[in-house]
Amino acid sequence: MKVNGTLLKKGSYDIRFNEETKELSILKNGKVVAKATTRIEKEDAKSDSIKYSSRANGDSAVLVSVTFGGSDEKLVVSGGEMAGS
């Protein structure tokens, strides 16, 4: 999957969100490997668990949004929603 042009290989990652800058950071072994700006969209209900959506773009996928468990806000990745267009 790609995040802001950076290809993330299979594996486990941590995700952090900075509310002040609206920036989403993807970390691998404590190091930031990708960052993306986001906008917040309200959801109808709180999410039970972390959820993400992606969109196909050629032979890979592009991260479109992330919703953290317990939150009713979806973080939409800037540019992700237009991937594949």
Image (cartoon, rainbow, N blue to C red):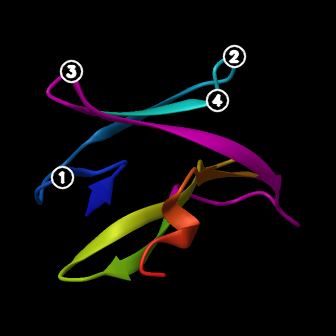
On the image, numbered disc 4 is attached to which residue? 22
Alpha carbons under labels 1 and 4: distance apart: 21 Å
The three-letter amino acid code for the residue at tag 2 is Glu
Dot 4 and dot 3 residues touching (CB under 8 Å): no
Label 2: few (<14), some or many (≥20) within 10 Å? few
Q: Residue at x 13, y 53 (%)?
A: 11
The three-letter amino acid code for the residue at tag 1 is Leu
On the image, numbered disc 2 is attached to which residue? 20
Dot 1 and dot 3 residues touching (CB under 8 Å): no
Which tag, 2 or 1, sits closer to the chain's start? 1
On the image, numbered disc 3 is attached to which residue? 30
Alpha carbons under labels 4 and 2: distance apart: 6 Å
Question: Is residue 60 within the magenta segment?
Answer: no
Alpha carbons under labels 1 and 3: distance apart: 15 Å
Label 1: few (<14), some or many (≥20) within 10 Å? some
Q: Which residues are magenta?
A: 27-51
